[in-house]
Amino acid sequence: MLRIESAYRVHDGQGGFVGFFPDGRTLWSTAQERDGYDLECVLKVWGPDRGVVLHRREFDYDCPAALSSDGRYLAWHRLTKGIIRLIRCDQTEPDREVLVGDEAMIHSPLFVPGTHDLMFIVDDYEAEGQW
């Protein structure tokens, strides 16, 4: 069964990933959008009743975000550099970037349920133990 009440356009480009917040109405989504000549990845947090409430644009991000089970934190990782951006969804704190390894490839970030502990896979043996 497919039920569509209405459609919302929140990105101007090729869609990427999407996920729901615990309230069931707020979403995060990514898309590839053009900024002049550059193709950048855009992450937005939005809801049909609130519009876009959080917007991040980066050059080499195009990965699914991980959301903590309480909806307070999003973790988003870069494609070519071993960096994870931690975003506080209520925007009371600035974003924090954590360097895992200079050229580490990060995969599958996910928060441990019920915690703010982040797990992920790293393809860089030299980065072991540096974070």
Image (cartoon, rainbow, N blue to C red):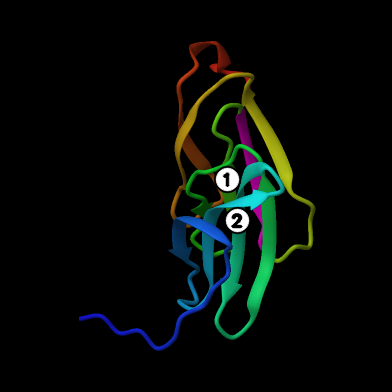
Establish if 32 lies above or below 5: above
What residue is shown with label 1? 76
Q: Residue at x 54, y 73 (%)?
A: 9
What residue is shown with label 2? 43
Q: Position of residue 104 (x, y in %)?
A: 54, 22
Could you tell me the amino acid type at mark 1?
A: Trp
- Is residue 113 among the parts visible in the rendering? yes
Q: Position of residue 74 (x, y in %)?
A: 58, 54
Q: Residue at x 50, y 16 (%)?
A: 124
Establish if 9 lies above or below 15: below
Neighbor class of circle 1 (other Cα within 10 Å; few <14, some 14-19, many 20+) is: many
> Foreground residue, 4 or 50?
4
Neighbor class of circle 2 (other Cα within 10 Å; few <14, some 14-19, many 20+) is: many
What span is colored magenta in the figure?
82-89
Badge 1 element: strand
Location of the C terminus (image quadrant): top right
